[in-house]
Image (cartoon, rainbow, N blue to C red):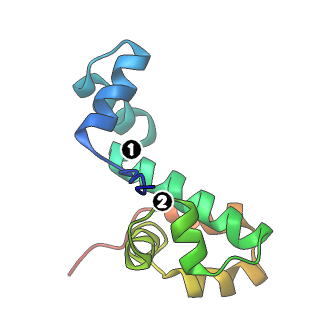
Amino acid sequence: MPKTKIVLYSAELVEELARKLGISRRWLEKLCRQTFERPLPSLLRLAWVNQAIYLMQHTHFDNSDIAMKLHYSEVSSLARDFRKTLRCGPDEARKLLIRQSREELLKSALRPSPPKK
């Protein structure tokens, strides 16, 4: 049986979301920026990382299992999304979860990034 690949962000996904909401793709992207001050791909990435963190807390899955469960094509893609969202990899996020809640960890992702030099 062929493995179904789920694309975490694509133009087709955005078009489908917009169609289901009854608005244009451009309006959906504009609403995301205005409402959440984040582009849509960033919001989708945050949702997937949130789900990964939930699995870290409530299962004994390792990073590879979590990546597979969330339909990432590779563990490195999961790690990349963690670094882009939380500014740390999944292993470091696991360690941080010992000291803080998922909500606190995700709040750090919502803070603006430090300016690049």
Please give the name of the residue rendered at 38% of the width and 35% of the height, measured from the top-left corner. Answer: 32
User: Badge 1: how crowded within 10 Å, few (<14), some, or many (20+)?
Assistant: some
User: Badge 2: how crowded within 10 Å, few (<14), some, or many (20+)?
Assistant: some
Viewer-nearest residue: 5 or 93: 5
Q: Percent x, y for residue 61?
A: 69, 76
Residue 37 is tagged as 1
Please give the name of the residue rendered at 44% of the width and 77% of the height, measured from the top-left corner. Answer: 75
- Is residue 107 something that shows in the picture? no
Count of marks overlaid on the render: 2
Horizontal arrangement in the rendering, residue 58 relative to residue 23 (left or right): right
Viewer-nearest residue: 39 or 115: 39
Please give the name of the residue rendered at 44% of the width and 41% of the height, measured from the top-left corner. Answer: 36
Q: Percent x, y for residue 45?
A: 43, 56
Looking at the rendered structure, the secondary structure element under dot 2 is loop
Q: Please, is residue 21 above or below residue 67 in the view?
A: above
Location of residue 15 by image quarter: top left
- Is residue 92 something that shows in the picture? yes
Q: Please, is residue 63 above or below residue 68 in the view?
A: below
Q: Percent x, y for residue 63?
A: 57, 79
Q: Amino acid at mark 1?
A: Glu
Q: Percent x, y for residue 12?
A: 27, 35
Q: Earlier in the sequence, mark 2 or mark 1?
A: 1
Horizontal arrangement in the rendering, residue 22 relative to residue 48 (left or right): left
Residue 108 is tagged as none
Looking at the rendered structure, the secondary structure element under dot 1 is loop
The residue that disc 2 covers is 71
Horizontal arrangement in the rendering, residue 52 relative to residue 22 (left or right): right
